[in-house]
């Protein structure tokens, strides 16, 4: 890997700008930039919360990737889970185990309290599915539904 070794650390409020840049990079990669409405101020506030978990991957002090999750209640299990939201590595650093390091950091966070990590991956993301399977994740197919105010607003 060019530069020094990869360092993984938990993001702090001072990392909001770099984290937002990475988040926007993921949205561009997924052709979904129009869906990003998060502001820098909001992200700074989120990074103060204990239930918001964001890990940054860095090389020589430059952020090259991140994973984000939310600790939340899992009613069926009568426990909490770590709900992984995003895993992203800049294109120039992919296939260099950076994603694996980020996932191991998230697993370490979950293991501290014996929690399960759950996330979604699109059916078309075959490379992602292969990556997660190699980590030992169990993959299940499920349809994800979203219900936005412009669609449910007429009934409330």
Image (cartoon, rainbow, N blue to C red):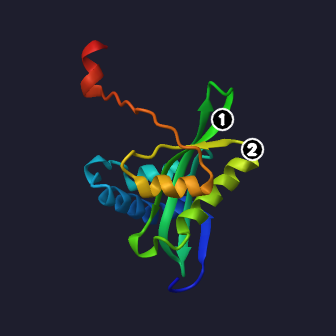
Q: In the image, 106: left or right of 3? A: right
Residue at 60% over, 65% down: 101
Under circle 1, the secondary element is: strand
Q: Nearer the viewer, residue 44 or 76?
A: 76
Q: Nearer the viewer, residue 66 or 2?
A: 2
Residue 115: mark: none
Quadrant in the picture for the C terminus: top left
Query: How many callouts does the rendering have?
Result: 2
Residue at 37% over, 49% down: 38
Residue with the mark numbered 1: 80
* Mark 2 and mark 1: Cα distance apart in space: 9 Å
Question: x, y percentage for residue 136?
Answer: 63, 52
Question: x, y percentage for residue 104?
Answer: 64, 59
Residue at 40% over, 56% down: 40
Question: x, y percentage for residue 86?
Answer: 47, 52
Q: Nearer the viewer, residue 46 or 108?
A: 108
Name the residue furthest bottom: 3
Residue with the mark numbered 2: 113
Does residue 65 lie above or below 70 as drawn? below
Callout 2 touching callout 1 (CB < 8 Å): yes
Q: Along the polypeptide, which appears first: circle 2 or circle 1?
A: 1
Under circle 2, the secondary element is: loop
Question: x, y percentage for residue 14?
Answer: 52, 63
Residue at 64% over, 59% down: 105
| Quadrant in which residue 78 is drawn | top right
Crowdedness near tag 1: few (<14), some (14–19) or many (≥20) residues, C-alpha within 10 Å:
some
Crowdedness near tag 2: few (<14), some (14–19) or many (≥20) residues, C-alpha within 10 Å:
few
Name the residue furthest top: 155
């Amino acid at each position: 890997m060019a530069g020094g070794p990869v360092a993984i650390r938990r993001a702090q409020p001072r990392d909001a700008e770099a984290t937002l840049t990475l988040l926007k990079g993921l949205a561009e990669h997924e052709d979904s930039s129009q869906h990003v409405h998060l502001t820098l101020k909001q992200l700074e506030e989120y990074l103060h919360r204990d239930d918001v978990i964001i890990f940054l991957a860095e090389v020589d002090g430059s952020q090259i990737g991140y994973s984000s999750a939310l600790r939340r209640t899992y009613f069926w299990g009568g426990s909490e889970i770590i709900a992984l939201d995003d895993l992203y590595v800049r294109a120039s650093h992919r296939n260099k185990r950076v994603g694996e390091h980020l996932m191991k950091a998230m697993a370490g966070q979950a293991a501290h309290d014996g929690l399960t990590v759950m996330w979604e991956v699109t059916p078309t993301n075959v490379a992602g599915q292969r990556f997660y399977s190699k980590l030992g994740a169990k993959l299940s197919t499920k349809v994800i539904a979203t219900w936005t105010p412009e669609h449910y607003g007429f009934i409330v």
